[in-house]
Image (cartoon, rainbow, N blue to C red):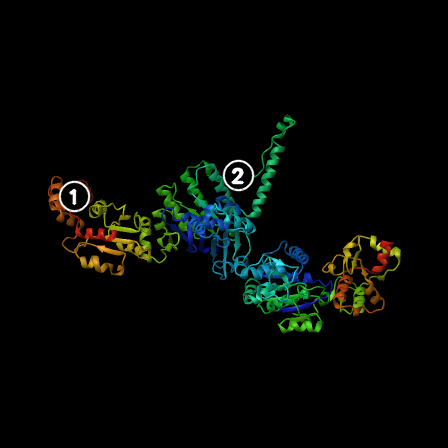
């Protein structure tokens, strides 16, 4: 199976220098908005397509890294220092001498393709003139793109070293996007020779129509004649659509369109002829309902005959497909982190666990993890009371893990350096439940907070005991037989909401929670 | 390993032998010097398989050295803007200037040497072994200078190597570089030793007989040029030294008879070219070999073997084009008829 082992980008779009390792099956790119997930997908697609037209359509100005261009502009602007951008795809060992060689950024024997965006030497004298000019213009227009294999061969789109398909569900709904998608699909599935035959037959078909059904009409029209168009704007590719249950894809809802696109791309190859080696999928979750999302995940999990690179914001996609396939893009100049080293049982946990916000957690810098709903409801207010600032202002996030599966999250925190405060009940044994249990997580950016007094064994007890007058007053009317503390324990979420509503400045935040807030905001 | 130099004679089916040696299983590299020959080989391979199979690569020699050997290892680090086939470097130059002209084009005659100097020869050998099971080289007698050295390195590779060539058809060199391999073609015995030294056995049987030339032509060539050529054919054809003006005019006016000149063949009308340029051609029935002044004299005195070897080889190429009759005409007679 042909696949990409790693991608190297230099001075390309927002990346100054970055290297992304890929596994041969499934890769899930996650990251904040603007972290460059889409840029990585489009970079891979551009290199594989080998199309100068595609690159020039985007424009060199948008492809060259702005910082590098800016740094050049601030320098003495020498020709030899003009920035060069490249994207390299390093392949597995697929034994084709046309891609085997040392013409790569590391000068070592390897298989791969390289797209290079560099000044066109032919225009040397003109570029020099521009560089010496007073208006400090950057010569974007004098850049060129070169597609070259590691063996030093120039290549173009005609040679498909890796058959790939790119699916971008954000561009959907309009006729143009549908047509382009169907065209791409057709290009990926049809053999070059097959396509030529189709074109030829289609043209003959049109000619037949001109000479047949249109003949009578044209005999009457004398000087002029009607004919079906057969030019670049009306040919087999522009007239094709995809049919499902006798309805064309353009007439389906956007959710269904998205689903069809992905499903069609992922279907298993029937024989080597139509094998697709690599599918690049941008945000497959777009427009999908929960049910369809689950089906989509099933499709992706089954597509093990090709390499998949998926960019997503979906908690469900990233966790249900095994977090170990996650590649976290966290910075434009640092290599992304993979979760490949996550313990197997933790990865399994997130595959099976009920709905959770694991991807949100992955993308956070500072996190407070709590056990349940009542802590979650009150946490933001407590934070404000302690710090006199909001959690949003301090970029602190709070997640309820529902129970005590904190360790699963801490396994991720370990790999990703997420500053994580765990707030939990001591469950009547502080030493065992809150200290000894976490001895494997004794790292600077992880800390567990709980009340050290084994008698104060729940969140509600601590709240009540620190604010007994307030609580007695607040819940006086709500209960019948239960004590106030018993009532709060039986109706945790409601009690928390009521506290939140009525809370005054003199409310006492339990000490261990204060400590957690101070520590996380430090 | 099958490593053989098959010494052939004109019209003995060299190209066919190479094509027949291939199969659809193993990976073959076929090299030849001229682009003409590449076309010819491609046609014959295509005729055998109905297409060019993916396991057979046909390269002209210099594009092989540049694209397959040089570029993969040195394009980024050393770089080059193509090959300069015309010029040579001044002998006093040092360093990279010995290998590149001012446009950074590699001098063709030193391209193979550059692989040695930049220390990638071992990598090149490994690459040949990695991608091919057998290397087949046509017209091997033309390898000279640094290219012969590269050939010796390829002979060390762990692949089958079939070299086919006619020592006496050595009419030009792939390249020359000073005194390097200068005496390679001085005599057949020494030539054979160079191959045996790198583990290549000599085979003079397989392609020792011509399918093209008749018994008469072969006997004539053996007798007059001293080239050992024999034939599979039994029939006799005509050989005639033509002096009659009418007959010469007839030959000159006959498009079906190729006229082969010592030099400037193209300036003569109707199907004329030079002796050496007819190498590799296999479609002439009757051939008219035009003898320049010196050759004409030596022929009439029976002293053709005294010709310089390069000239003698070209004359051998010219005479051995004939499938049927062979006519000899003196250039002086033709000039007289044309100008007169």
Which SS class for mark 2? helix
In the image, residue A229 above or below residue A99: above
Q: Based on the displayed image, in which of its 4 quarters is residue B263 positioned?
A: bottom right
Which SS class for mark 1? loop
Q: Can you identify the residue that label 2 sits on?
A: A238
Chain bearing mark 2: A
Q: Where is residue A469 drawn, in percent x and y? A: 11, 44
Left or right: where B125 falls relative to A342: right
* Residue A158 visible to the viewer: no
Question: Image point 71% across, 62% down: which residue?
Answer: B13
Q: Based on the displayed image, in which of its 4 quarters is residue B309 positioned?
A: bottom right
Q: Where is residue A428 drawn, in percent x and y? A: 16, 55
Give whichever of A118, A406 is nearer the camera: A118
Instruction: Find the distance from the CA under tag 1 to the CA under tag 2.
Output: 68 Å
Give whichever of B7, B248 is nearer the camera: B248
**In terms of sequence position, does the residue under pointer 1 or pointer 2 come before the other?**
2
Q: Name, please, the residue furthest toward the top.
A: A220
Q: Where is residue B69 drawn, in percent x and y? A: 57, 62
Q: Can you identify the residue that label 1 sits on?
A: A505
């Amino acid at each position: 199976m042909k696949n990409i082992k790693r991608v190297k980008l230099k001075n390309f779009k927002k990346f100054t220098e970055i290297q992304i390792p890929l596994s041969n099956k499934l890769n899930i790119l996650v990251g904040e908005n603007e972290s460059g997930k889409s840029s990585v997908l489009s970079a891979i697609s551009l290199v594989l397509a080998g199309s100068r037209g595609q690159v020039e359509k985007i424009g060199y100005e948008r492809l060259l890294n702005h910082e590098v261009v800016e740094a050049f502009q601030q320098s003495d602007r020498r020709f030899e220092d003009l920035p060069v951008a490249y994207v390299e795809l390093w392949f597995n060992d697929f034994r084709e001498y046309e891609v085997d060689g040392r013409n790569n950024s590391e000068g070592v024997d390897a298989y791969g393709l390289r797209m290079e965006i560099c000044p066109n030497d032919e225009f040397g004298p003109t570029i020099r003139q521009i560089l010496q000019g007073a208006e400090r213009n950057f010569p974007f227009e004098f850049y060129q793109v070169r597609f070259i294999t590691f063996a030093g061969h120039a290549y173009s789109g005609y040679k498909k070293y890796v058959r790939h398909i790119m699916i971008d569900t954000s561009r959907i709904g309009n006729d143009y996007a549908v047509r382009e998608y169907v065209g791409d699909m057709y290009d990926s599935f049809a053999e070059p020779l097959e396509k030529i035959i189709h074109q030829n037959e289609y043209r003959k078909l049109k000619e037949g129509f001109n000479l047949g059904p249109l003949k009578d009409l044209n005999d009457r029209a004398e000087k002029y004649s009607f004919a079906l168009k057969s030019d670049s704007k009306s040919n087999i590719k522009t007239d094709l659509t995809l049919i499902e249950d006798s309805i064309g894809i353009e007439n389906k809802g956007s959710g269904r369109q998205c689903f069809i696109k992905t499903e069609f791309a992922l279907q298993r190859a029937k024989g080597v002829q139509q094998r697709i080696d690599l599918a690049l999928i941008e945000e497959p979750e777009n427009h999908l309902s929960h049910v369809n999302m689950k089906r989509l995940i099933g499709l992706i999990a089954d597509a093990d005959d090709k390499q998949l690179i998926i960019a997503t914001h979906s908690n469900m996609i990233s966790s249900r497909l095994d977090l170990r396939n996650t590649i976290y893009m966290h910075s434009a100049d640092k290599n992304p982190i993979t979760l490949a080293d996550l313990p197997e049982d933790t990865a399994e946990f997130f595959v099976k666990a009920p709905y959770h916000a694991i991807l949100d957690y992955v993308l956070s810098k500072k996190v407070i993890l709590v056990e349940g709903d009542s802590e979650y409801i009150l946490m933001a207010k407590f934070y404000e009371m302690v710090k006199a600032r909001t959690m949003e202002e301090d970029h602190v996030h709070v997640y309820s893990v529902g129970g005590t599966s904190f360790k699963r999250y801490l396994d991720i925190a370990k790999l990703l350096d997420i500053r994580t405060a765990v707030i939990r009940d001591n469950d009547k044994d502080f030493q065992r439940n809150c200290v000894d249990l976490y001895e494997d997580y004794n790292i600077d950016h992880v800390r567990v907070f709980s009340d050290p007094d084994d008698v104060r064994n729940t969140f509600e007890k601590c709240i009540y005991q620190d604010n007994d007058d307030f609580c007695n007053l607040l819940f006086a009317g709500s209960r019948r037989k239960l004590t106030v503390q018993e009532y709060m324990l039986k109706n945790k979420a409601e009690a928390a909401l009521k506290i939140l509503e009525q809370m005054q400045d003199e409310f006492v935040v339990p000490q261990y929670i204060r400590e957690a807030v101070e520590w996380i905001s430090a | 390993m099958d490593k053989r130099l098959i010494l052939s004679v004109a019209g003995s089916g060299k190209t066919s032998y190479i094509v027949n040696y291939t199969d659809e299983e193993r990976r073959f590299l076929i090299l030849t010097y001229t682009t003409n020959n590449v076309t010819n080989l491609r046609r014959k391979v295509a005729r055998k398989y109905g297409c060019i199979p993916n396991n057979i690569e046909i390269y002209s020699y210099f594009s092989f050295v540049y694209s397959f050997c040089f570029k993969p290892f040195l394009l980024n680090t050393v770089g080059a803007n193509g090959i300069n086939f015309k010029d040579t470097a001044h002998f006093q130059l040092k360093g990279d200037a010995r290998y590149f002209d001012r446009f950074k084009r590699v001098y063709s005659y030193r391209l193979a040497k550059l692989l040695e100097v930049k220390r990638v020869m071992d990598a090149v050998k490994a690459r040949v072994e990695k991608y091919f099971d057998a290397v087949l080289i046509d017209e091997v007698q033309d390898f000279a200078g640094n290219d012969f050295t590269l050939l010796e390195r390829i002979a060390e590779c762990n692949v089958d190597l079939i070299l086919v060539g006619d020592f006496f058809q050595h009419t030009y060199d792939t390249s020359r570089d000073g005194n390097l391999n200068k005496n390679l073609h001085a005599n057949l015995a020494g030539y054979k030793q160079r191959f045996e030294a790198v583990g290549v056995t000599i085979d003079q049987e397989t392609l020792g007989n011509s399918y093209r030339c008749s018994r008469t032509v072969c006997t004539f060539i053996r007798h007059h040029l001293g080239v050992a050529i024999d034939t599979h054919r039994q029939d006799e054809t005509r050989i005639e030294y033509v002096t009659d003006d009418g007959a010469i005019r007839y030959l000159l006016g006959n498009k079906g008879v190729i006229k082969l000149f010592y030099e400037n063949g193209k300036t003569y009308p109707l199907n004329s070219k030079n002796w050496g340029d007819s190498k590799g051609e296999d479609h002439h029935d009757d051939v008219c070999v035009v003898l320049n002044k010196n050759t004409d004299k030596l022929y009439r005195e029976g002293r053709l073997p005294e010709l310089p070897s390069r000239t003698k080889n070209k004359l051998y190429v010219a005479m051995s084009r004939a499938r049927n009759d062979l006519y000899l005409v003196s250039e002086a007679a033709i000039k007289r008829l044309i100008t007169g």
